Amino acid sequence: MKVVLLSLLFMTTVVSAYSSNIGQKVDSLLSVMTLQEKIGQMNQVSGIDFSTGPWNKESSIVDALHRGEYGSVLNIHDPEEARRLQTEALRSRLGIPLLFGLDVIHGMSTIFPIPLAESASFDLAQIRQSSRFAAVESALCGVHWTFAPMLDVARDARWGRVMEGSGEDTYWAAQVAEARVKGLQGEDGDSCRIVACAKHFVGYGAVVAGRDYNNVDMSVAELYNFYLPPFKAAVEAGVGSIMTAFNDMNNVPCTGNKEIVRGILRDEWHYDGVVVSDWCSVAEMCNHRYAADQKDAALKAIAAGVDIDMVSRCYAQYLEELVAEGRVDVAEIDRAVGRILELKYRLGLFDDPFCAFDSAGADAVRCSPAMRKAARDMAKRSIVLLKNDSATLPLKNIKSVALIGELCRSKVDMMGNWSANGDAADVVTLEEAFLQRNIKTNYAKGFSIDNDECYWKEAVNAAKHSDVVIVAVGERGRQSGEDCSRGELTLPDNQQKLIGELKKAHKPVVVLVMGGRPLIFNLAAADADALMVTWWLGSEAGNAITDVLFGEYNPSGRLPMTFPAHIAQLPIYYNQKSTGRPLSEEVSFIKGYIDIPYKPAYPFGFGLGYTTFSYSVPKMDKSQIGPLESATLTVTVTNSGQVEGEEVLQLYVSDCVASITRPVRELKGVQKIRLRAGESRTLVFDINEAILGFYDNAAKYVVEEGFFDVMVGPNSNDLQKCQIEYKL
Ligand code: GLC
């Protein structure tokens, strides 16, 4: 015991010495910096050849680097360009090294599945590994800082950025947040560690009407219960930076919102990492009509606690003036610059400004066998099987396949949006994967994915000459992502009605739905013999899909977002409120809508596999718990099918009566297990106040007395219930 205490004491001493040592270095550097040099550190510029938002391009930044006018640069994709700019920055008076930032959202050069797809795996270890691999490639390419993970809870699939996040559930988004931050930033001893950036703080996924950049308005309880927790998880996981969102939150733009940045991040959560604005979001406070001009915007952003101004130059142009006028205290500047310098020290940039830059190393790692295996492992686990009539899948003894649709042979679409240094040439398409398996492919375009043209005759003919038909429907890879909100998610008739035509060839028809968001495909689903959601799976897309089609991997993905039956249902999500007239098929008086169904096409958490699982009746070992006590829910799961497979066990909690209206259920636990055919396993979930509490309308976390339904099952609909009472 004594040894443990001594080693803990030693570790604490080392960590605090390390921190104070960095603290001393930061203070010493600050003491010799001019005000202009300090403001330079708060100014971020974009690389000239690539921008991720509207701006007035800088002609050349080298002279400005010599004057120490930039502290960080984003959108540099080439390690040699990064090396060149870093060399120029080191020629400034104090030679403070630059931070290089880039949106590495799902892989740097080897492209992994889009984050929404990875979220569908419900496999935290895989998600963390995916982030680690992305960090290694990024660091070798000269990236110190990625603007990821995106942690915006999103319930409206019209918003194109749902592709970048973990879906509609808060609990799961918080779990993924921790996995991604730890994967990206690595642990002591890891090489190629980069800084993560939790974004977009906060509530961006709740934009009105799913329209990107639109306003956001919600109750305090909604904010604290549904949108803040993933960011808190990221802070607790040690995330090095946080990015403010474009949107306003309750009438104040996030980039100038003291309540959420200073109030919640700094004061409530004691976050002392770097806060960076989103692209031009400082200046855009003028467009919000919240700032009178860019000087006023700079004042509001620094007052809110934003350390770095991304691209808008408001800090560069006005902070010095604001200090001279006594409206900004130099101490505020010093605190912001201190956080930026500390990040650079922690990254080791002052010891080695070129950090892990290694062009040759980057080339060697790019799509290496190990990287491709990791991408393929992640991709196959992200696929969600929604229908499999008559065990159409897995495919057996087929010699020829009809591949219908451009997406069967498209490389660029498989990468999805935000594909960093990804090269479409590296992508393995579905067609290539079948050819590599020496299976004859009969390709037919079938339909245009960009307009309503049909080429059904050729498609039906290809079907007639094949053992099985695979049809890839969906949207383009760049139809989801930033500034890609869509008002129509129903797949066009030229895609959906083709399935019915193909059925006339009397061959099994397997439909693959490819996209970056929930789409609507009721007709196609009705006619398909089997249907899978394959999202955008990245460099190994084709191999991952055929691994699943041939049963080499038994699909285990589950929907991280509710799939609507009609666009008008949006926003639709499983953890809705009960309301005074709960929707029910039994009560005919309450219809939801008179002209469309109110139920979704597929519920949150849903997904099938090639085997089946049965659940025992769950048991709770206690009927009542009090403060600091816990109960245990026990359930036995059996693989009742013929092949080994994985099940995603989900635990939901419902507060039967509370001091504010609460959701009908909330996900509070996930366990993904692998069982051999016939194998049973008993699993337990800890039921304690940590999963019974909520934030009230005063943003106070409360656990109230009363009864709670505790439910467990394979998705948010098919659940068995226990009950527990919480008593003070
Ligand atoms: C973009 C995005 C943000 C990204 C940033 C830098 O506009 O909103 O997610 O990290 O600009 O590219």
Image (spheres, rainbow, N blue to C red):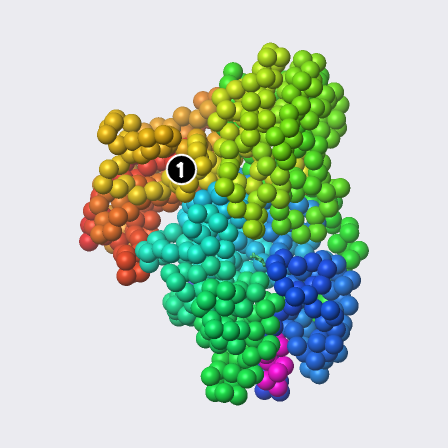
Question: Taking 294 as reference, is 206 above or below it?
Answer: above
Q: Position of residue 266 (x, y in %)?
A: 43, 69
Question: Taking 114 as reference, is 151 above or below it?
Answer: below
Name the residue: 60% across, 76% down.
Answer: 316
Q: Quadrant of the N terminus?
A: bottom left
Question: Mostly what secondary structure, the magenta segment?
Answer: helix
Question: On the picture, is 576 further left or further right than 466?
Answer: left
Q: Position of residue 630 (x, y in %)?
A: 29, 48
Is residue 394 something that shows in the picture? no
The front one of 237 and 212 is: 212
Corner quadrant of residue 279: bottom right
Name the residue: 52% across, 46% down.
Answer: 485
Looking at the rendering, the stretch of residues picked out in magenta corresponds to: 34-41
Name the residue: 40% across, 26% down.
Answer: 614
Q: Is residue 363 magenta?
A: no
The front one of 142 and 76 is: 76
Corner quadrant of residue 687: top left
Question: On the picture, is 253 further left or further right than 626?
Answer: right
The front one of 336 and 690 is: 336
Corner quadrant of residue 139: bottom right
Is residue 526 something that shows in the picture? yes
Ligand 1 shows up in the quarter that is bottom right
What type is the residue that disc 1 sits on?
Gln
Name the residue: 65% across, 49% down.
Answer: 419
Residue on which disc 1 sits? 569
Q: Position of residue 135 (x, y in %)?
A: 64, 55
> Badge 1 local density, few (<14 within 10 Å), some, or many (20+)?
some
| Cβ at disc 1 under 8 Å from ligand 1 | no
